[in-house]
Image (cartoon, helix red, strand yellow):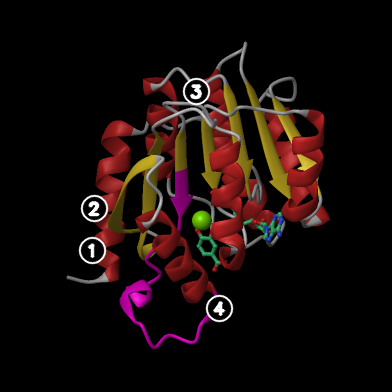
Amino acid sequence: MAENQWTTVDRYLTDHVVPSDAALDEALHAIEQAGLPAISVSPNLGKLLYLYARMISARNVLEIGTLGAYSTIWLARAAGSNGRVITLEADPKHAQVARANIARAGLSSIIDLRLGRASETLTALAAEGAGPFDLTFIDADKVSTVDYFNWALEHSHAGSLIIVDNVVRDGAVADPGSTDASVKGMQRFFERLAGESRVEATALQTVGSKGYDGFALARVLADRR
Ligand code: SAH
Ligand code: DHB
Ligand code: MG
């Protein structure tokens, strides 16, 4: 039972439930051609984000961590032509690739990409009175996950979803002695989640073409008072 079997099965599943799509395929190709890291969500996780957004009829979506906009395109498809996705990216080269992918997908009017460190662009969004967001996807620097979660929770409404990528990292999340800053960031996030009564949450381990990782899903219970 090895990583190459996970990839084979991922391909089998994807072949059956994730129809090939020119804009998404071209986005992945452009990400690779530009030398960006191969850390976009897998097609089946992209479709899961899309389905979660569809299940709650999400119109106002926030993403923290764009890379080449692969996950962004999935979210924008779910939000539909009356929807809006704000996506935050710190690296100008990633943002440039993302903008080209968004334009090629015909989604420039739905997706609002903000270039800058999320700590700053989130402050600007708060000042603009942005949100509340129906769905927030957190997928940027893992050290700051707990801060992004706090921000998302303050800019949600009852029934909003907050989804966090990369919470397992090869199982390291359960190692209390880990000295890896990203792992410690996720452990801080889980401690925060455990103590937060305003959400109901779960987390799942995943294996597949991207190895062994996982994601967390939280549903906001009550509007912020
Ligand atoms: N969500 C994308 C993958 C994001 S990869 C997808 O699945 O398709 C993580 C991205 O977060 C990278 O592009 C990285 O440059 C960006 N990032 C890292 N730290 C950040 C920060 N502090 N603010 C904004 N973006 C950041
Ligand atoms: C990394 C980041 C991600 O968002 C991901 O899905 C996988 C890996 C990383 O920074 O290594
Ligand atoms: Mg990720």
Q: Nearer the viewer, mark 3 or mark 1?
A: 3
Q: Does 176 appear above or below 1?
A: below
In primary-sequence order, the first of circles 3 and 4 is 3
CA–CA distance in space, label 2 to label 4: 31 Å
Q: Indicate left or right for 96 with 215 as reference.
A: right
Task: Calculate the distance from the C-alpha at mark 3 to the C-alpha at mark 1.
Answer: 30 Å
Give the residues drawn in magenta, as a range. 163-181
Q: Which residue is mark 1?
A: 5
Up the image or down, 157 lies above or below 119; here it is above
Dot 4: few (<14), some (14–19), or many (≥20) neighbours within 10 Å?
A: few
Q: Is residue 3 magenta?
A: no
Q: Disc 3 and disc 4: Cα gap in Å?
A: 33 Å
What mark, if any, has residue 181 been given in the picture?
4
When the figure is inspected, residue 4 is found, relative to residue 155, above or below; the finding is below
Which one is nearer the viewer's eye here, 51 or 149?
149
Q: Amino acid at mark 1?
A: Gln
User: Label 2 near label 1: C-beta < 8 Å?
Assistant: yes
Spatial CA span between label 3 and label 2: 25 Å
SS class, disc 1 = helix
Residue 208: x and y in percent read 32, 58
For mark 4, give the secondary structure: helix
Q: Main secondary structure of the magenta part?
A: loop
Indicate if the residue with disc 2 has its beta carbon within 8 Å of ligand 2: no
Does mark 4's beta carbon lie closer than 8 Å to ligand 2? no
Q: Disc 3 marks which residue?
A: 78
For the residue carrying disc 1, how many other residues have a C-alpha within 10 Å: few (<14), some (14-19), or many (20+)?
few
What residue do we see at 73% from left, 45% from top?
122
